[in-house]
Every structure is written in structure tokens, then in C-alpha cells.
Image (spheres, rainbow, N blue to C red):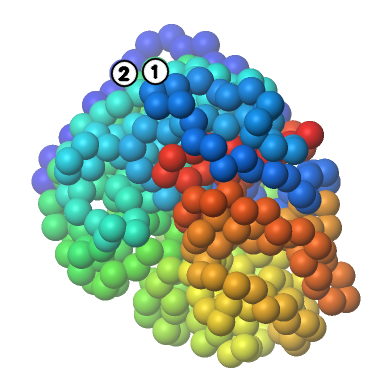
Amino acid sequence: MTSRIVLLCGSLLIGVSAAGADWRQFRGNDATGVAPEAKLPVKWGVAKKDAEEGDKKAEANEGLGENVAWRVDLEGRGVSGPIVVDGKVIVTSASGFKHDRLHVIAFDAASGREAWHRQFWATGRTFCHPTSSVAAPTPASDGKSIFAFYSSNDLICLDLDGNLKWYRGLGYDYPTAANDVGMAASPLVVGDTVIVQVENKGESFAAGIDTATGETRWRKERDHAMNWSSPAVLKGKTPNEDVVLLQSPSHVSAHKPATGEIVWSYATSCSVIPSALGAGGMVYLPAGGLTALRPSAQPGSQVEVVWKEPKLGPSSPSPVLHDGRLYVINGAPALTCADAESGKVLWRLRLGGKFWATPIIAGGHLYCVNDQGLVRVVELGDAGEVIAENDFGEPILGSPAISDGAIYFRSDKHLWKIGK
């Protein structure tokens, strides 16, 4: 089938930001969910009064609460997380009776003022479960462009000023690529390729898209089964050795980002919501609880199962890793800390509520937000301790972002900047 690519060419002047200040994709720049040096507030207060009807500007800090830098209204619905690129906070949402109006909105990170707002029509299926949204995948960036992906399988590329560079209607190219509750896998940028995972009972595949042109570099058939996990990256000793991890219900496979060439594969029954984590030459796979794999960089090589721990099975949030320790939220819900080398459980802390958002780590603290908007801040150490609870009073399903000493949360209604 002929692909539909809307491509805008021209001479573009693009400001490239320092990667250290950015949070460019789901779980951050390196997809581990950690900003170790960031110093963030652990306590803040959110005023309960609603924003004035129709006011789309950032509200002043006065009346919002301690350590709330700003709050802005959002149009439409979205459960995707925010990203931060070049001093802009980017969010996606969907609106309209059929949720077929796709929004990409940029806010100035310092002031909260809207920098630009772009809208598009969906070309694919927009039906999804009421708890989810067409704007479920978290957008991604390479520091020069923004890649907004939706449950309708529309992939939109904009420059940092909001100008359209290209548009791929993957739902137009592959009409049966959909499921009964909506798609949710977030895109991943590795080098000059953006990877999308479109796994379902219909036309199920993963693809590598050229970041500059929007053309398909490679496409791989995947399990014909529903799957919502996102692609991850396992960093090599050099960028040429980076591999993309694609987790499916029956296996996980590693691929070269630019060509899709398979490097290795491991067959096992995997979870279909939390995503694999690649760090330190290891892959931590949500399978049989949590399974630690040590792969080789050589094509066709086998992977070593280092350990498998049933007690570390995550629910919806993906695992995060910091300072040799893994952190997993299960369905109880409980936060479990384990040694990354052995899988040995070190401590467990009971939490309340249901969790969809993946937690993040900064400054020795882990920030866990449940689906009702209650954020528990856990001080990490030999035994985890909840040192603060902060209630937004609104459902939050998207994972937060960290940049320049601030943390960003989004609900359907609002985007918050928490920082001193």
C-alpha cells in the first residue's frame, strides 16, 4: 500500500538545546526515569479553586500554593506525559465528539505562557477506553524536532517553533492497525530514527521512521496481539552500538535503530503494559515478575538470564533504576526496591490507590503519582519512607517530566510546574 507522507521542505533555523536541561521522551532522555542531580521540592500545595472559565494563560503563583510556579489550562483530553525541550514544555491532547482533533501545545517553561498551539485531524481510528485518550503516547524529541504520536497512529513531526515538517497517517497506511481500547506505546528517538510500536490483532508492526523526511526506513511484523508497552533503548559503548528493545507478548527483541536488523531475541511471556528497561549493559524485562537479561552486542548471539524474580512484577508503571537498585510498583499497590545485580528484594513500602504513571527519581527521592493525582514522595535508602504527600485533586495518568529544578505534571484539565 502506498504510504501517505505530508512533508514540508525548506531552510529551517532550529535552536538546539543542551540535553541536560531537557526531558525529551517517556522516562527522560535515556529512558531510565532518573534525573539524579535535580533538586526538586518534596512538598507543595495546590489550591482547590478552579481556573477562570476560558482563561488559557498561566495563573500567577499567588493563590496556587507553595512551590507551584504556575498552572495552565489544557484543551481536550490526554493521558500522555509532558516533555521539555529547549525551554518549552510540550503536551498532546485530543478533542471533539470523536476525539479526532489532535493538539500539540507548547508552553514557555519559565512563565507558563502558551508559545504555540497546533491542531490536526486524525486519519486513523480514534475509539479508545474512557480511562484512556487518543493522546495516550508521550511525545518525543531529538532536540531539533518534536514527534507527536497518537492512538489513531498519526505521527506528526514539528520543529521547535511548531512548524509542520511532515505528517504520517499510519492509520491510513494500515487501516486494521487498532485495538478495542486504544493504542498507547510512546515513540522513541535513537539517532536519526524515530521508532513506533503498533502492536495489535490487526496489522501489527514496529517501524523506524527517518526523523528528517518521515519516510519508513524499516518495518517489522510483530505479534498479532494487543500490546501497550513502549520501545526502549539499551545504550552501547558507542552510539553505533545502541539497540532498540521491542517487547511483545511472546518475546523481546533487540534491533539496530537505523536498519531494524535484529541483534538478538529472547522468547518468554511478557507483560503488555509496563515497558522494558535497558541500563548498564542489562535489560530488565517485565516477564515472570521481572527478568534480568545480559545480552551480547554480536548479531545472532544468545542472551544470558542473570536472574528472574516473581516478586518484582510491575503493574502498569514501568520499572526504574538508580544507583544499582531497581524500583517497581505492583498492583497491591506496593513499591518494591531490589538489588539490580541479584534481584534480591531489599524493602517494600505500601502505597494507596491505583497507578498508571511511571515514577521518576531525582535528588535521592522517588516521586509516585497515583491515578487520583496524589503524589507520594519517597526518600530512598536502606528503607523507603514516605516523607510527603501532595494532592492535585485531579486524575493523573501520564508520567511526569523533570527539567532545570522543576517537575511537570499534567491531568486532562491542567499542566503544573512544581519548583521553587
Q: Which residue is mark 2?
A: 8
Q: What type is the residue that disc 1 sits on? A: Asn
Identified at 31% across, 18% down, the residue is 8
Q: Are the residues flagged by discs 1 and 2 in contact, CB closer than 8 Å?
A: yes
Dot 2 crowding, Cα within 10 Å, few <14, some 14–19, many 20+: few
Measure the C-alpha gap from mark 1 to mark 2: 9 Å
**In this orientation, which residue lies closer to the viewer: 299 or 203?**
203
Percent from the top left, x then y, of residue 40? Answer: 78, 44
Picture quarter containing residue 118?
A: top left
Kindly identify which residue carries mark 1: 163
Horizontally, residue 41 falls left or right of residue 327, namely right
The amino acid marked with disc number 2 is Leu
- Judged by depth in the image, the label closer to the viewer, 1 or 2, is 1
Q: Is the residue 222 above or below the residue 64 in the image?
A: below
- Snapshot quadrant of residue 223: bottom left
264 relative position to 219: left or right: right
Report whether residue 261 is seen: yes
**Picture layout, residue 49 above or below residue 10:** below
